[in-house]
Image: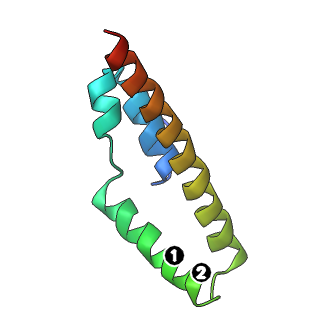
Amino acid sequence: MAVAQPDTLFSEILDFLASTPTPTQIIAFKPSDHLEQRLSYLLEQNRLDLLSSEERDELDEFLRMNHFMNMLKIRARQKLAEE
């Protein structure tokens, strides 16, 4: 039985990594348009100092997951360079 995941960058990355992507696919990974729009909203609210505590947590998760994917992309580029 599948468990419904909330629409988060974390769940998108989990689904993506579960698909066993190639290094090239890892480098090309981008969040969905929906999540890109949500991030833009959160960044704007943050700029205006209007984030709720829940939104602050959500933005922090986006930033952590973005850092994780950036590090993964660096490793994927290194792997491709070694081939």
x%, y% of residue 72?
A: 48, 32
Q: Residue furthest top?
A: 83
Query: Where 13 sits versus 81, above or below?
Result: below
- Report the Cα–Cα distance between label 1 and label 2: 5 Å
> Which quadrant of the structure image shows residue 57?
bottom right
Point 41% across, 34% down: residue: 15
Disc 2 secondary structure class:
helix
**Location of residue 1 in the rendering, given as x and y in whole percent from the top left corner:** 46, 28
Which residue is disc 2 drawn over?
46
Does 61 appear above or below 24?
Answer: below
Q: Can residue 1 be seen here?
A: no
Quadrant of residue 59 within the rendered picture: bottom right
**In screen coordinates, is 31 left or right of 44?**
left
Residue 22 coordinates in the image, percent (x, y):
30, 20
Instruction: Identify the residue shown where x is 34% and y is 24%.
Output: 19
Rendering coords of residue 55 (x, y %): 62, 72
Circles 1 and 2, Cβ within 8 Å, touching? The answer is yes
> 66 or 14, which is in the foreground?
66
Q: Is residue 9 above or below residue 2?
A: below
**Residue flagged by tag 2: what amino acid is it?**
Asn
Local packing at callout 2 (Cα closer than 10 Å; few below 14, some 14-19, many 20+) is some
Res. 31 in view? yes
- Give neighbour class at mark 1: few <14, some 14-19, many 20+ (Cα, 10 Å): some
Tell which residue pokes out farthest to the front in this image: 81
Q: Looking at the image, is 63 positioned above or below residue 23? A: below
Please give the label number shown on residue 62. none
Of the residues shown, which amino acid type is indicated by label 1?
A: Leu
* Residue that carries the numbered disc 1 in the rendered image: 43
Q: Residue at x 64, y 60 (%)?
A: 60
Could you tell me which quadrant the C terminus lies in? top left
